[in-house]
Amino acid sequence: MEYRSLGPHLDVPALGLGCMGMSAFYGAADEAEALATIRRAVDLGVGFLDTAEMYGPFTNEQLVGRAVAGRRDEVVLATKFGVTGRQDRPLDGSPENVRRSVEGSLRRLGVECVDLYYLHRVDPLVPVEDTAGAMAELVREGKVGHLGLSEVSAATLRRAHRVHPIAAVQTEYSLWTRHVEAEILPACRELGVGFVAYAPVGRGFLAGRFASPDDVPADDVRRHLPRFAAQNFPANRRILDVLTRFARERGRTPAQLALAWLLARGDDVVPIPGTKRRRYLEENVAALDIALSPDELAGIDEELPAPSGERYPAGAMASIQQ
């Protein structure tokens, strides 16, 4: 397994595993298969596991903790805090919540230290310097190894980084979500911060899983995402058509090509495709064997249409810093 660096001191597998869908948002859960998928990932060297307290809520951390029990030295554990699910305070980056949240995460994961601890979304009521300062205390106490931020602007990253070094920024990045290339990714590189790309296969869309909006299960959150909506679906299918053609020329799947494209964006970019099943995990891991040439990368860039629709509904977009 190739390793990549997030910041100067945290080495992780070049491909991680997003665990969210095993417990929340993407339809019915299958705990036995989820546990088997996480354990298979560790067997394959994909030991960079991503979770969050709000996935479930709380049940995904418990799942990951059970899956890696007895294998702590084989994994890099990343979790997040700050999205509460409460109507009165949906985002909470207060120092009090920083400490309250990490204690819960450590307990559910069954570990003494989280390797990478993210602020899931910035709390507009709390200066990010205050949140980062409280997170830094956890590093000094040995409860957290490294700090991360999720869905932040370049300006917010710089503010937090001045308080304590940030190892990684996690933001959506894929062939249909490339806004990070303008300011966020350059700021990460300027500061020596690694970049973790979530939803690298467009939440399954770029894998060709959905022929129409009706293919999305009724209990799946993707039913409510603009890019999966009927009015945007045909335009976004054209992105998949281009990707599929390039993949077939390589004898690969669209998901593998989408991941190979991200892996080629720089050795500081680490995709964390999510899956609930071992067969898709193994398909994703095979992307590590694909080396795209400069001509192939240029050809994809040239032919790929722009996406239609926002990433999230308006309410969720309001919590994201572009």
Image (cartoon, grey):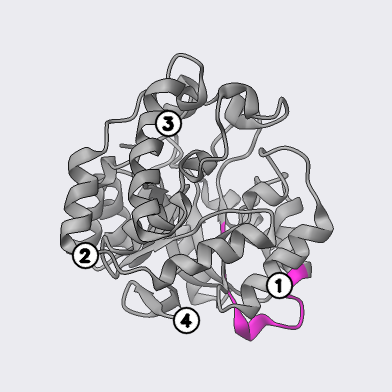
- The residue mark sitting in front, 2 or 4, is 2
Q: Residue at x 51, y 68 (%)?
A: 285
**Displayed quadrant of residue 31:** bottom right
Mark 2 nearby-residue class (10 Å; few <14, some 14–19, many ≥20): few
The one nearer the camera, 31 or 248, is 248
- The residue mark sitting in front, 3 or 4, is 4
128 is higher (above) or lower (below) than 104: above
Q: Amino acid at mark 2?
A: Ser
Residue 217 is covered by the magenta coloring: no
**Displayed quadrant of residue 141:** bottom right
Q: Amino acid at mark 3?
A: Arg
For disc 3, the marked residue is: 311
For disc 1, the marked residue is: 39
Instruction: Point out residue 206 in the picture as x, y percentages from the top left corner.
Output: 45, 42
The one nearer the camera, 6 or 264, is 264
- Cβ–Cβ below 8 Å for labels 2 and 1? no
Q: Earlier in the sequence, mark 2 or mark 1?
A: 1
- The residue mark sitting in front, 2 or 1, is 2
Q: Earlier in the sequence, mark 2 or mark 4?
A: 4
Residue 183 seen anywhere in this rendered image of the structure: no
Which region is colored magenta? 67-79
Q: Amino acid at mark 1?
A: Arg
Distance from label 2 to label 1 (Cα)? 33 Å
Which residue lies most toward the bottom here? 73
110 is higher (above) or lower (below) than 118: below
Q: Residue at x 78, y 46 (%)?
A: 29
Q: Residue at x 29, y 42 (%)?
A: 178
The one nearer the camera, 196 or 235, is 235
Instruction: Point out residue 152 in the picture as x, y percentages from the top left corner.
Output: 35, 45
